[in-house]
Image: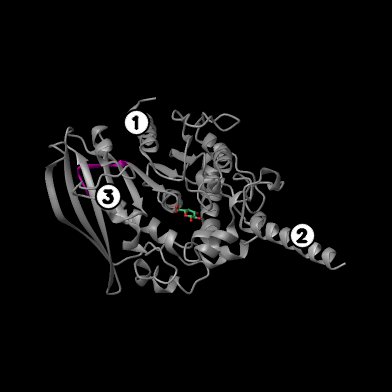
């Protein structure tokens, strides 16, 4: 009898642990629930959107508000002033191929300020303003080393310059330290009212806000083509890049690398990292309202295909890595796929197939681009080479 009891307790605890596990993360396709995605083209009032004017006037602003309210928080746009100072400049670095600018961007509101340090390399072999990549850097600061003592594939400045692109980066800690206890020690000091609001800005929103302030600077930088700025980020940076591009139309192209949960993967598949898990591990990333959706992805009024759709008609390139099931490669592909109908309103024909492409096969000639790189969660040279091909296709070819 005792053994039977012990065995049942043991069995029950395994079942409980598994159920608990599934609440946080899941790697089993058979546990993906049957789900229905919200229709990007159906308004909250049940009206069907039939053209781009209706999308832009009704559903697009409504969708943006839903993301703001339930996930990423508000994006404060009011500040008193902004100042740009070149703190270091060298017109002949990388054997004369590039012009280095280190710019301090200082934003003021109510006697407080936040300082964003931008590293920027601009190609010299052109008289035209250069298209640019802006990376939201969520790794160590030396990954974007202006001296090039450290050269990292995470931000391959030489490769961008060789290909005629300027490349820039700022570090997330300048706008919001990536720490649940410290994230408010950045831009949120300028907007303290956000902290007490359930739909207030948090760290991911702050990083997107920072990218927009860099965009303010690019609009005043004659060496940069402000109409050809690609915003890019890896993982948590990729979530912020997508949110920044969704709400700031000045970004002409978006790259969301291995962004996973609350980035480019669908929440409703409940595959890989789930909402409860991300909200528990990183309570400072998303707004307070998002916590209501722990274990309740199906109740979200939006899913991530709609975040991608908010960028339309501007191109979006999302990626995964084959070993990174945490970020759900299939769910990322499906999010792109389900954004297609909004791109169609702009007569933008996607080249995504019905099924995800084979590992390492990149879909470039499409407003919605994708690859699933062989290997682990990372941002590599393979990824960057494809970002450049994607940007070349959209920025440089006449179609
Ligand atoms: C993980 C997190 C992911 C992703 C990743 C990263 O721990 O669960 O959502 O953002 O960090 O940023 O590398």
Secondary structure at badge 2 equals helix
**Disc marking residue 11:** 2
Q: Compared to 206, does 42 lie above or below?
A: above
Q: Which residue is mark 3?
A: 144
- Label 3: few (<14), some (14–19) or many (≥20) C-alpha neighbours in 10 Å: many
Q: Quadrant of the C terminus?
A: top left
Give how far across and how far down residue 359 sits, in percent: 51, 32
- Looking at the rendering, the stretch of residues picked out in magenta corresponds to 220-228
Would the CB of label 1 be found within 8 Å of ligand 1? Answer: no
Which type of secondary structure does the marked residue at label 1 adopt? helix
Q: Position of residue 98 (x, y in %)?
A: 17, 39
Label 1 crowd bin: few (<14), some (14–19), many (20+), radius 10 Å: some
Which callout, 2 or 3, points at the residue further toward the start of the chain? 2
Q: Quadrant of the N terminus?
A: bottom right
Name the secondary structure under disc 3. Answer: helix
Disc 3, disc 1: CB below 8 Å? no
The residue where tag 1 is placed is 392
Q: CA distance from mark 1 to mark 2?
A: 56 Å
Q: Is residue 259 left or right of residue 36?
A: left
Residue 157 placement: quadrant: top left
Going 38% across and 40% down the picture, which residue do you hit? 380
User: Callout 2 environment at 10 Å: few (<14), some (14 to 19), or many (20+)?
Assistant: few
Q: Residue at x 84, y 63 (%)?
A: 4
Of labels 1 and 2, earlier in sequence is 2
Mark found first going from the N terminus, 3 or 1: 3
């Amino acid at each position: 009898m005792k053994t039977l009891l012990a065995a049942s307790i043991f069995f029950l605890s395994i079942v409980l642990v598994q159920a608990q596990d599934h609440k946080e993360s899941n790697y089993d396709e058979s546990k993906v629930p049957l789900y229905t995605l919200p229709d990007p083209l159906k308004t909250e009032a049940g009206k069907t959107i039939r053209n781009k004017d209706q999308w832009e006037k009704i559903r697009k602003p409504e969708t943006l508000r839903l993301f703001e309210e339930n996930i990423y928080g508000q994006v404060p746009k009011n500040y008193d002033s902004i100042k740009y100072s070149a703190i270091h400049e060298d017109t002949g670095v990388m054997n004369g191929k590039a012009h280095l600018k280190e710019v301090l961007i200082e934003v003021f509101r109510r006697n407080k300020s936040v300082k964003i340090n931008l590293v920027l390399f601009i190609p010299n072999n052109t008289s035209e303003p250069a298209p640019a990549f802006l990376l939201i850097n969520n790794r160590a600061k030396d990954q974007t080393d202006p001296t090039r003592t450290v050269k990292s594939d995470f931000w391959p400045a030489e490769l961008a310059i060789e290909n005629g692109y300027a490349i820039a980066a700022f570090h997330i800690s300048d706008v919001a330290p990536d720490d649940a206890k410290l994230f408010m020690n950045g831009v949120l000091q300028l907007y303290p009212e956000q902290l007490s609001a359930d739909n207030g800005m948090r760290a991911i929103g702050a990083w997107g806000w920072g990218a927009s302030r860099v965009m303010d600077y690019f609009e005043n930088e004659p060496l940069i083509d402000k109409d050809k700025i690609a915003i890019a980020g890896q993982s948590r940076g990729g979530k912020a890049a997508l949110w920044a591009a969704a709400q700031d139309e000045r970004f002409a192209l978006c790259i969301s690398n291995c962004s996973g949960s609350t980035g480019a993967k669908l929440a409703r598949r409940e595959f890989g990292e789930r909402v409860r898990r991300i909200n528990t591990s990183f309570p400072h990333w998303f707004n307070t309202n998002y916590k209501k959706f722990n274990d309740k992805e199906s109740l979200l009024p939006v899913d991530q295909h709609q975040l991608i759709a908010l960028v339309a008609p501007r191109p979006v390139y999302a990626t995964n890595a084959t070993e990174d099931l945490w970020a759900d490669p299939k769910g990322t592909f499906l999010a792109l796929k389900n954004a297609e109908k909004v791109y169609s309103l702009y007569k933008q024909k996607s080249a995504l197939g019905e099924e995800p492409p084979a590992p390492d096969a990149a879909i470039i000639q499409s407003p919605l681009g994708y690859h699933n790189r062989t290997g682990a969660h990372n941002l590599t040279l393979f990824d960057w080479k494809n970002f450049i091909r994607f940007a070349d296709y959209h920025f440089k070819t006449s179609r």
